[in-house]
Image (cartoon, rainbow, N blue to C red):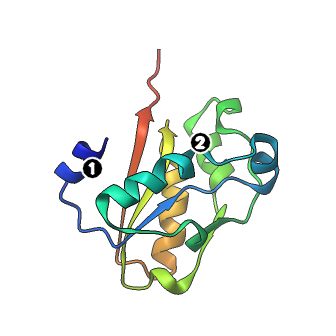
Amino acid sequence: MLGFAQSLSWNIDILIPIPLGIKRLKERGYNQSATIAFPLALDLEVRYAPKMLSRIKETRSQVELSTRIERYENTLDAFKSSSDVLGRTVLIFDDVATTGATMSSAAAALLSAGAKDVYALSVARAMGH
């Protein structure tokens, strides 16, 4: 994945994993996106900043939702960003992307807080049957 990320030639300042809700984090005990994002940030030599984005709305698991509209509504206004992203280029990272609803909502929060640009990367892309 590092080679792919480097080949994109994105001029990234900060890498932020998509945060889990408190309930889901307690159930799992860890954030799988953060587990992958941290070594990626080290390899890309960019700041790893998991606390610059927080989930402020507990959402249902996207797996439980069947339509694109349900997934976008589920994640609408689910995130809040700190103002530390002001003027910076951010890479958000999630383990799996299906419709892009989670990343879109996270990107909207970052842009609202003043991020210059937001890129998104995931390890896997879920495909329809």
- Residue 12: x and y, percent? 30, 68
In the displayed structure, does residue 23 sit left or right of residue 66? right
Residue placed under numbered mark 1 in the picture: 5
Q: CA distance from mark 1 to mark 2?
A: 29 Å
- Whichever of labels 1 and 2 marks the residue nearer the N terminus, that label is 1
Residue in view at x 50 percent, y 41 percent: 95
Residue 124 numbered mark, or none: none
Asked if 86 appears above or below 34 in the picture, the reply is below
Quarter in which the N terminus is drawn: top left
Q: Residues within 10 Å of mark 2 (few under 14, many from 20)?
A: few
Q: Amino acid at mark 1?
A: Ala
Q: Amino acid at mark 2?
A: Ile
Crowding around mark 1 (Cα neighbors within 10 Å: few <14, some 14 to 19, many 20+) is few
Image coordinates for residue 65, horizontal then vertical, percent: 67, 33
Q: Position of residue 15 (x, y in %)?
A: 42, 64
- Residue nearest the observer in this picture, 58 or 72: 58
Closer to the eye: label 1 or 2: 1
